[in-house]
Image (cartoon, grey):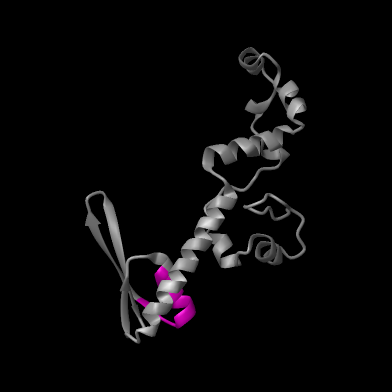
Amino acid sequence: MDTICKICGKTGFKRFKMHVLNKHNLTMEVYDKLDIMTPVDEAEVPEELEVSEKVEENLGKTLSDVLTEFEISEVELYNILRKVKYGSNKKMAEVIVKKESDALRVATELAESNENEIQVNNVYIAEALKNSFGFKCEKVVGKQIGNVLEKTWIMKK
């Protein structure tokens, strides 16, 4: 089965890693963390999207007429509706890239402080310290504050 890009929905890649890097400016590590839904193909569209009397009753035209009017397939409509309901895939990727970029900046400042132990409350900063500056996570401490579990990563060189 072909790999389907979680961001743009394209398939048929010879080198998927290069697509993710060049088209979306993401590493595979970041891409794998994306919590977004993969666009579906024709085989996965629920039967509820078949042309029905209810659509005609509500819109005054059949679903088939609507699809023809907008020149899209049922699969494309289904993916559009999922993006509207769950948010834009591209925006999510941009948010993650921004968080990682900001975290790397903070991690750089912390690493330059030459401290052997650093405590951070942000998983992106902890990951940047680990991946870019050789820190290891000694432990993660959780503290319940109301309904929120606040975590602190204790990082050591």
Q: Left or right? Give the position of 53 relative to 33.
A: right
Residue 100 location (% of width, % of height): 48, 66
Q: Judge by depth and name the residue closer to the eye, 100 or 52.
A: 100
Residue 45 location (% of width, % of height): 66, 35
Q: Left or right? Give the position of 138 relative to 8.
A: left
Q: Left or right? Give the position of 87 relative to 66.
A: left
Figure label count: 0
Can residue 157 be seen here?
no
Task: Assess whether residue 132 is covered by the magenta stretch.
Answer: yes
Q: Left or right? Give the position of 85 relative to 6.
A: left
What predominant SS class does the magenta segment belong to?
helix
Q: Quadrant of residue 29?
A: bottom right
Q: Quadrant of residue 60?
A: top right
Instruction: Say above or below: 117 vs 5.
Output: below
Residue drawn at (32%, 85%), measured in percent from left and top? 116
Q: Which residues are magenta?
A: 125-137
Residue drawn at (71%, 24%), measured in percent from left and top? 66
Can residue 20 be seen here?
yes
Residue drawn at (60%, 35%), measured in percent from left and top? 81
